[in-house]
Image: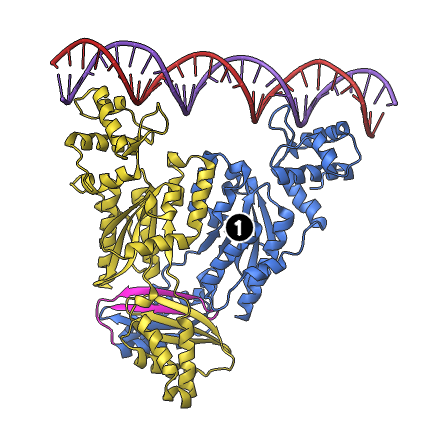
Chain colours: A blue, B yellow, C purple, D red
Amino acid sequence: MDEQLTARSKQILQAVIEDYIATAEPVGSRTITRSHPISLSPATVRNVMADLEEMGFLVSPHTSAGRVPTDKAYRFYVNSILSAGNLQQGNQEEILKRCNFTGKDVDDVLKETSRLLSATSSYMGVVMAPRFAAHVYRQIEFVKLGSHRILAILVSQSGAVQNRLIQTEQEILQEDLVRMSNYLNELLHGLTIAQVRERLLQEMQSEKARYDSLFARALKLSEEVLGDDDREVFLDGQANILDQPEFADTAKMREIFRAFEQKNLLLDLLDRSLEAEGVQIFIGADSPLLRMEGMSLIASTYMTGKDTVGVLGVIGPTRMGYGKVIPIVDYTAKLISRLLEVE
Amino acid sequence: MDEQLTARSKQILQAVIEDYIATAEPVGSRTITRSHPISLSPATVRNVMADLEEMGFLVSPHTSAGRVPTDKAYRFYVNSILSAGNLQQGNQEEILKRCNFTGKDVDDVLKETSRLLSATSSYMGVVMAPRFAAHVYRQIEFVKLGSHRILAILVSQSGAVQNRLIQTEQEILQEDLVRMSNYLNELLHGLTIAQVRERLLQEMQSEKARYDSLFARALKLSEEVLGDDDREVFLDGQANILDQPEFADTAKMREIFRAFEQKNLLLDLLDRSLEAEGVQIFIGADSPLLRMEGMSLIASTYMTGKDTVGVLGVIGPTRMGYGKVIPIVDYTAKLISRLLEVE
DNA sequence: GATTAGCACTCAAAAGTCCAGAGTGCTAAC
DNA sequence: GTTAGCACTCTGGACTTTTGAGTGCTAATC
């Protein structure tokens, strides 16, 4: 990947990228020599830039404008320049100061986290909730609301709650409901929700279900609570991208908002980041969603205990303050992991 | 309010408003005579329009543009022209087709409703959830997750669920938790959450709390679940307003998004609609939020049984298709009321 | 007396023109 | 290898012109 760039080219590439990140304007040879401590004349810089353009790191929007970094340049920047230690520190206090998670349930915490990410990065914050299936079963509870209406509440070990309103055909007695949940709590204790699902299927075919109709009905009810398992995504700070000059044009903006309205595109992207651990960076063409809109994603997985369960991150323009945002995402992911572990 | 407009002026005012709603361009005398079946010459229409301007129903952005309806005109339109029966029907099938509420809990239903409203109106849909305090207490449940971690779950009669993670200082035994919830369920049965709150305060001062420490602790725990009672607001379809030509300019757009990011402004506005029953219309200057952004709100209260509990509605530009949206809001409110009643 | 035709006038938006500035590539000198 | 110099290019902003929709007024008409 290193493609033998000389130290000088690297330095100049870095200068171009950082100027562009700061101004969102194509940057020219002159500007660089002024704003960076490079003891070269503009003419020399021009030569180097021409080479970099040749190699595909830069493009000029038209003959006589400055040059703009390509996705390839950003990738190189992130991998070879930033990782060499140019990451900024010191947002940790800000993050800690902003987060108040006390007494919230898991979903609220994650929602709050997306807000936190967007506020500290000033781009969009995104959090994908753990797949419910990954949680460990803790308890099921049936609350009778009316003669034919039951509220089923499923609680996981980590405190996530899923509830569902169920209309029943026959009336079920309160005491039967209690017996049912006792059945189930014993049967399902310690399994993950995914395992629970399998187990229910098994049991429904079992001898016991055949002669014990109450048991059978219990299985059926509990299956309903497990019904859907769409992952939730929390997205916050859309308004932030309005401030990015590259999206000033209305048509562009509309496209972006429309794209992010469909959370499934976003889900696909986040799903991919689940595959590897730690911080990952998707730049432009890495994903259909991002490519179209000229955006990047900095994502990190987070865990409960030792299981990777979800992804959180920041979405911004490719021209994003990577040096600042990467540590933010990294730190936040660790914070959430720690939080979920204690729980 | 009728301010003696002649039938002809009314007709012309209506024409101006409807043209403007359709095109978002100032409308001139010529345009009207062409697009409406009015057997008058442009010159005559001009005279009438001049009168209407005098009366404050129209303004011209500048000398030689057409004219634009004022808020006053919209109000007149909504009250005196539309209510005379120009409401369109026939969105009911679309609404019914789009809504799938089966098996969702209350919050999900309301969220889905805001989506429904925005999709059918093509403006923004907004739903304010019932104040939790208005719900009737049904049951409280404590689930022990760890030695010092308890999940408290509060269920209302209508199936709304509120849960809270609580860190305790001393460990509480499972069986004590069961006794606690039994206490509370008996004590609080049939009260509204608001009453529950008062009752808890009373009880905490009582004799019993003084000598029965378990009881006292139960009270304290349950108080925590009641902690916050911020009303939830679901807002959907922000992207829709991007399509409105009057907001094409980026600065305007940004303003709007920022304004709606702070849900408290929205809450204030919606709170006001709670005061009266049925469909209400706020146009521009009626509210600080709307005035600034040139928007209107069509809202309706909805109920559970016979209690007004929440508000839902549509927010769009003042130049909004009132004739279409009013019935949508009305019908949706009734739909939700019916749904919550059965529950 | 209400309605209409005619006309001079106004103004904003669109199209056209011009200019300055930033930038480039190339060549020749250092 | 580096740099100075120069001719060339292109965009964006300022300024002007044109166009067209619309107005208000007056005088003629129904």
Residue at figure coordinates x 40%, y 75% from the top left: B223
Residue B188 horizontal side relative to residue B144, left or right? left
Q: Is A154 colored magenta in this rendering?
A: yes
> Residue A201 at x, y = what percent?
37, 66
Magenta stretch: dominant SS? strand
> Residue B164 at x, y = what percent?
43, 70
> Residue A144 at x, y = what percent?
28, 72
Q: Is B41 colored magenta in this rendering?
A: no
User: Would residue A343 be seen by someone viewing this image from the given angle?
Assistant: yes
User: Would residue A219 be seen by someone viewing this image from the given angle?
Assistant: no
A77 over A195 or under it: above or below: above
Element at label 1: helix
Residue at figure coordinates x 41%, y 37% from the top left: B247
Magenta residues, start to end? A149-173
Residue at figure coordinates x 47%, y 69% from the top left: A103
A131 over A237 or under it: above or below: below
Q: Mark 1 points at which residue?
A: A272
